[in-house]
Image (cartoon, rainbow, N blue to C red):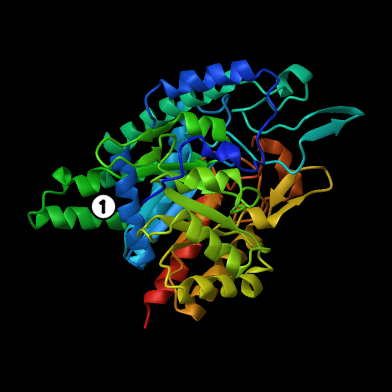
Amino acid sequence: MTNTSWHPGSWQQRPVRQLPAYADAAALEQARRQLAARPPLIFAGEVAALRERLASVARGEAFLLQGGDCAESFDELGESAVRDTFRVMLQMAVVLTYAARMPVVKVGRIAGQFAKPRSSDTETVDGVTLPSYRGDIINGAEFESDVRRPDPQRLLTAYSHSAATLNLLRAMARGGYADLHQVHRWTAEFVRRSPQGARFEELADRIADALAFMEACGFDAARSPQLQEVEFYTSHEALHLHYEEALARRDEGSGRWYGGSAHMLWLGERTRDVAGAHVEFLRGLDNVLGVKLGPNAQPDDALRLLDALDPDAVPGRMVLISRMGADQVAQRLPALVRAVRDAGRRVVWCCDPMHGNTVTTANGFKTRDFNRILQEVREFFAVHAGEGTHAGGLHFEMTGQDVTECRGGAQALTDDHLAARYRTACDPRLNGSQSLEVAFLVADMLRSRLTP
């Protein structure tokens, strides 16, 4: 990829949105320099491996599962929170792999998802106006002037938390936790008691029987890395450009730049302006890139973004993530899919059924309805079936923990349940039981595509 006019700081010459106003420019520069001196969190070879896996997704030979927190919190990233999200993603991937009969590429919204876009720079409560909470990488959620003041030292804290989380994820992915022989151990107790927990146990029994049969036939399943380990990649919205620039690195082998903060970086609805700073920064990186496309996205928007971010049409580089809202998919998505297909672009099409389906209850809780989430997924699959393209992936805000943030599902959560365990730092997430329930419902859709 040739970017003769690009360098990691060239974004500063473009219009920029969604960055905080730091009162102390010298303190920000000091934090940036400290970050730039630290090792990258991921490496170029890992980025290349993910790009290769996603090229298979774009060809219709694999499926992408992307999920995790809406906004990670410095206070919530202990071992149990990371483990619970990791294992429910393993469960979802097994369910989808079994149904689709194809590999599932696992990408977490984790180890860097600390910044959140906001519709307003300020928030007013009881006549007091303070900066909006923009994620723990910038400020704190408590409505206090000292806490809401953007603090550059939080950039360093975000790096440290990300490094610790990545260390744990790599240990679980490679150290035996993901071994298919341990599939029965992945189910959290509160999920085990649910109907989908019982259904997963039945699937786990079938997997255990299959492994026993293979071993009886002489296949040494206990020594097969494909059964003992998983590839697990990280992603987040590349919102805080000072942080991202500080972690950009040049690969010695290829001479190309890559973002050292995550394997995949994406742009949101508010930062995908093709003339803006965020597009300018990402276009020069070798990472896998995602772009969120909402109901107002036009076909020309998608094509201009692809031309800017992927002029060489590199296989597996681009993930287009639709987030339309359940009632908008059938009307808005087909034109985008057709335009990209007719332009000869082979991208990964992924569905985010969360962000277009957020509502606020009468008692002030932001929530999402399980049925509308599932409706958007169904509409996404239907559009791609109609256009002859591959519905390549799903993008969820979810956690493995027993939270009560989204209504519905087999647990039949209602407005009255939300306050019981509403713990999100920003937007409502599917809990472990609801996440597994979605996986089984999507598995049925994938299985139906294989049925003559």
Looking at the image, which residue is at 45% across and 79% down? 388
Residue 234 located left or right of residue 158? left
Quick one: quadrant of the C terminus?
A: bottom left
Residue 443, image x, y percentages: 44, 64
217 or 426: nearer the eye? 426
Question: Where is residue 264 drawn, in percent x and y?
Answer: 44, 45
In the image shown, does 428 or 118 lie closer to the viewer? 118
151 left or right of 95?
Answer: right
Residue drawn at (51%, 28%), measured in percent from left and top? 77
- Amino acid type at mark 1: Ala
Residue 178 seen in this snapshot: no
Q: Is residue 231 above or below residue 81?
A: below
The crowd level at tag 1 (other Cα within 10 Å; few <14, some 14-19, many 20+) is: some
Residue 251: x %, y % from top left: 31, 37
Name the residue that disc number 1 marks.
208
State the image coordinates of residue 155 (x, y, percent, origin top left). 55, 24
**Is 419 on the left-hand or right-hand side of 253?**
right
Residue projecting furthest to the left: 218
Farthest residue toward the front? 5
**Vertically, is 163 above or below 208?**
above
